[in-house]
Image (cartoon, helix red, strand yellow):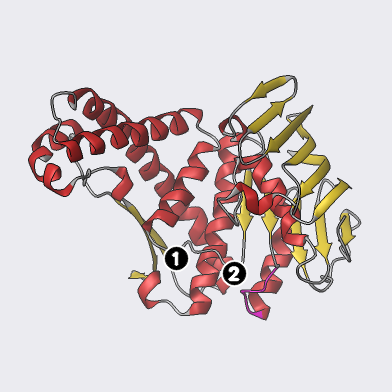
Amino acid sequence: MTIQQLFIRRFRNYTESHFSFSQKMNVIVGPNALGKTSLLEAIHLLALGRSFRTTRTTDMIQREAESFFLDAQFESNGIEQRIAVAMSPREKRVIHNQTQYSSLSPLIGLLPVITMTPDDDLIKGGPDSRRKFLDLQIAQFDPLYLHYLTRYQRAMRHRNQLLRNHTLEAISPWEEEMARSATYVVKRRKSLTQSLQTLAQESHHYLSGDHGTLGLNYLSHFEGNFLDQYQKTRKKEVIMGHTMTGPHRDDLMIKIDDQEARHFASEGQKRTCVTALRLASWHLLKQQTGQNPLLLIDDFGVSLDELRRKQLLQCLPEFGQVFITCVDPLPLSDANVNIFEINKTG
């Protein structure tokens, strides 16, 4: 899996730019605030249909423009393909080869990707950030997962509205849909957590020099028959006005030496854990898709100490096509490295 060409128009501070990428290492070097992160953001959006920096379309549109346009030529399993995205506050349009879509969800899985950023809130953030981590990972190799997750969320919104309105006559079909979807979502999240465990531990040992043991536990808010539970809790949830049981309440516990990293790990340990989890996610996604996912690293090594930066840099050649941003040049000598010096955008 490699991106060969990328065209950007009216995205962030890029008026119109074209990039040709190496199949291996692509390093974007330059001062801050000139568009290095925006280039990774564009690739991430083409892969997952969302930004890792904002949820607002207007934030990504160049000032005084009405929309932005991204167009990538890529190779997947030996076949050259094209994806393009045009977005404005009123419209989303996706083109994959010759097929056009009016939503961004068809993008997920076309360009498998793992993204590492210095402000990653995987450990420091709330349960929602960890659920999102699991959801995006699974959705990239299991098309049914996004289907069930979306149906669960839609059915829950309807059920919550009926609870708030004290209108329970029509609630059963939504509960049945929720139970069916919740069962699939929880099962896949648990399976992913188990699969990540060994890979994450191996990555953590490599980065930390065998200091500390990384552990993962999926914390399911409920174990049992979801449909029975929804029926039992109706009266209480009418008072609360929302659904209290289901995968929307679950969490992923990340531990170092059997202690929850969020509360007991040092800042350095937390950053090492996050990096290890992202690398493990890359390896697992490769196993699941049979391809090398893209690896995006923003502000390379800024959140790691010198030893861990060196360890991370040394292992990158095994990760297929890599995109890195940094302020200063990296000590790289590989002939397959393509260096982009960003002095201004336009």
Q: Which residue is mark 1?
A: 123
Name the kind of residue labelled 2 in the image.
Answer: Leu
Q: Residues within 10 Å of mark 1 (few under 14, many from 20)?
A: many
- Is label 1 in contact with label 2 (beta carbons under 8 Å)? no
- Quarter of the figure with the N terminus: top right
Most foreground residue, 116 or 40: 40
What kind of secondary structure does the magenta stretch mostly adopt?
A: loop
- Tell me which segment is drawn in magenta: 300-305
Query: Residue at point 66% right, 78% down?
Result: 307
What x and y, as percent, mark residue 322?
74, 53
Name the kind of residue labelled 1 in the image.
Answer: Ile
Residue 337 counted in the magenta span: no
What x and y, as percent, mark residue 117?
62, 62
Q: Using the numbered discs, state the Cα–Cα distance from disc 1 to disc 2 in whole angstroms.
A: 17 Å
Most foreground residue, 267 or 290: 267
**Disc 1 versus disc 2: nearer the observer:** 1
What x and y, as percent, mark residue 156?
29, 36
Find residue 185 and report its image quarter: top left
Q: Mark 1 or mark 2: which comes first in sequence?
A: 1
Q: Which residue is mark 2?
A: 207
